[in-house]
Image (spheres, coloured by chain):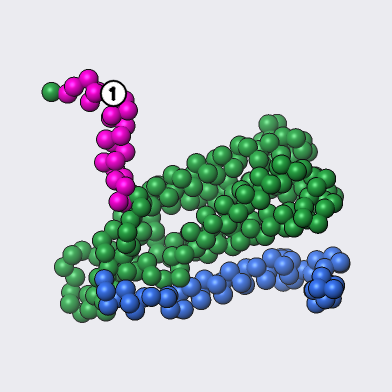
Chain colours: A blue, B green
Amino acid sequence: MGSFLWAALVPLNHPDHYFHWHFLEISAANAIVIVLMVLTFVAALLLPFPGRRRRRENP
Amino acid sequence: MSTEIDRQWTTRLRKRSFGKLPPEKMLPDTQPSYVASWIYVFGVATISALIVVIATGCILAIFGPEWWHVSNIGHFVNSLHLWSVEIFFFSMVVHLWGKYFMAAWRGGRAMTWITGMFLFLASVVTALTGYVSQTNFDSQWISTQAKDAINSTGGGAFFNLLNPGQMLMWHIVLLPLLLVILVGAHVVMVRIKGVVPPFEDDKPATPSPIAAAPIAAESTGAPQ
């Protein structure tokens, strides 16, 4: 049942979606992974690290 | 005057190894305060994913293709192997971006950067040999497409993507061995030189008070 619902949410039984822009061509799956990596990179720079304040007070 | 024991290769190797990398430097108790940032976790995340990749790969090697194609638990372990590879590359790329923008080759760390670059390239080849070792239509498609790229480099004479036995051996013996050796060298070099400091900490010891003020609270951590 769970796998059926998941398959309904993300239907994968079809050819890949592709984005075309001039000479660039990239699959939707690869584009999503690249966007997620960029978001993770930015979040890693901006989000506070647990215990950072304590480390500053007790070097 | 050196004794016979001092001249033994084991003694010389031990003294040289512990001189360069004493145990307290190999397994330190503390890290500099600037390491308390999420951007520093992706190297360890990559190694953690690699451990899962190797562990699931060992299970796949024990039971074989019929098992991973047919049984439910085989599908599950096969998926774990795939998704841990996805996390491995994801973490490695974020780690690469972080180190690139830190210019992490500063302070005599060029070889750390270079081993990381070779690790990335070797990982790509390992992933390719894995994709062509799936024993399904996907692996046939990938091998027939990729062979042209390899042949155009002249490497097809000894690295034949249409030879599944050769590709499987590269995937489960040679390339994992190379990766583990390179990861070991990479980590040892990080431990010898320490984690690369932020640009502000890399300046000479007597910077102007205005430039030094904002970073003073950041740089009070334990020495490397």
Camera sees residue B211: no
Which residues are drawn in magenta? B2-25
- From the viewer's side, name the closer residue of B89 and B106: B89
* Residue B64 at x, y percent in the picture: 77, 43
Q: Does B5 appear in magenta?
A: yes
**Residue visible at 17% across and 77% down in the picture:** B209
- Left or right side of B95 for B78: right
- From the viewer's side, name the closer residue of A48 and A40: A48
**Residue visible at 69% across and 65% down in the picture:** A30
Identify whether B140 is placed above or below B39. Answer: above
The part of the image, by quadrant, that contains residue B103 is bottom left
- Left or right side of B15 for A36: right
* Residue B216 at x, y percent in the picture: 24, 75
Q: Chain of mark 1?
A: B
Identify whether B182 is placed above or below B198. Answer: above
Residue highlighted by disc 1:
B8
The part of the image, by quadrant, that contains residue B65 is top right
- From the viewer's side, name the closer residue of A32 and A13: A13
- Left or right side of B191 for A44: right
* Residue B147 at x, y percent in the picture: 75, 42
**Residue visible at 27% across and 74% down in the picture:** A58
Q: Does B114 appear in magenta?
A: no
